[in-house]
Amino acid sequence: MLYYRSMAFLPFMLGLALGSAVSIAKVILVDRAVDKALSMDRSRAGTYVGAQYLLRMLLTAAALIISAVVPWMSIWGAAAGVLAFQIGIYLVQFRSRGRAGSGHQP
């Protein structure tokens, strides 16, 4: 019941912090990649966006590997941090589409 106040919660919290930081970094990388790709020609933009995608996946893999190897960090917390932001974005988009179709103002 008081798990979050115990020291046993610390590895999960550290993993969650790492995963959340990686997730935020990935959003920033996507924003920069889109801005830069829009100013490139089509073939270079495709190569650039593909490389950026690979970089973001490597960043995610690195966070999960670090959290799996470091004994004082939880891989479950890191996975939750990595996935939470994407799930939150999808939920916000889903809710905003539902409101747009029903005629309600946010």
Image: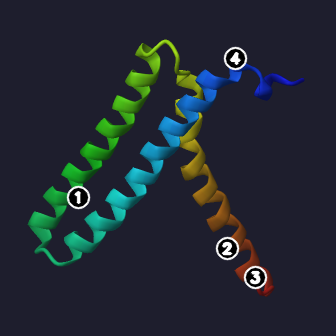
Check residue 49 in the rendering and tell me which mark sits there, or answer none: 1
> Counting other residues with Cα less than 10 Å from the Cα at mark 2, is it few (<14), some (14-19), or many (20 or more)?
few
Q: Which amino acid does the dot numbered 2 rest on?
A: Arg
Q: Please name whichever residue, 104 or 102, is drawn nearer the observer in this view of the structure.
A: 104
CB atoms of marks 1 and 3 within 8 Å: no
Q: Give the CA separation, mark 4 to mark 3.
A: 40 Å
Tell me residue 2's x, y (percent). 86, 24
Specify which label sits upstream in the sequence, 1 or 3.
1
Check residue 96 in the rendering and tell me which mark sits there, or answer none: none
Specify which label sits upstream in the sequence, 2 or 3.
2
Q: Which amino acid does the dot numbered 1 rest on?
A: Val
Mark 3 — residue?
106
Q: Give the CA separation, mark 2 to mark 3.
A: 11 Å
Q: Secondary structure at mark 3?
A: loop
Q: Secondary structure at mark 1?
A: helix
Mark 2 — residue?
97
Q: Give the CA separation, mark 1 to mark 3.
A: 33 Å
Q: Residue at x 52, y 21 (%)?
A: 73
Specify which label sits upstream in the sequence, 4 or 3.
4
Check residue 8 in the rendering and tell me which mark sits there, or answer none: 4
Q: Residue at x 19, y 50 (%)?
A: 51
Does residue 17 appear left or right of residue 2 in this picture? left
Does residue 23 appear left or right of residue 30 in this picture? right
Of circles 4 and 3, the one toward us is: 4
Q: Which amino acid does the dot numbered 4 rest on?
A: Ala
Tell me residue 34's x, y (percent). 29, 69
Q: Secondary structure at mark 4?
A: helix
Q: Give the CA separation, mark 4 to mark 1.
A: 41 Å
Tell me residue 88's x, y (percent). 63, 55
Specify which label sits upstream in the sequence, 4 or 2.
4
Of circles 4 and 2, the one toward us is: 4
Q: Residue at x 76, y 21 (%)?
A: 6
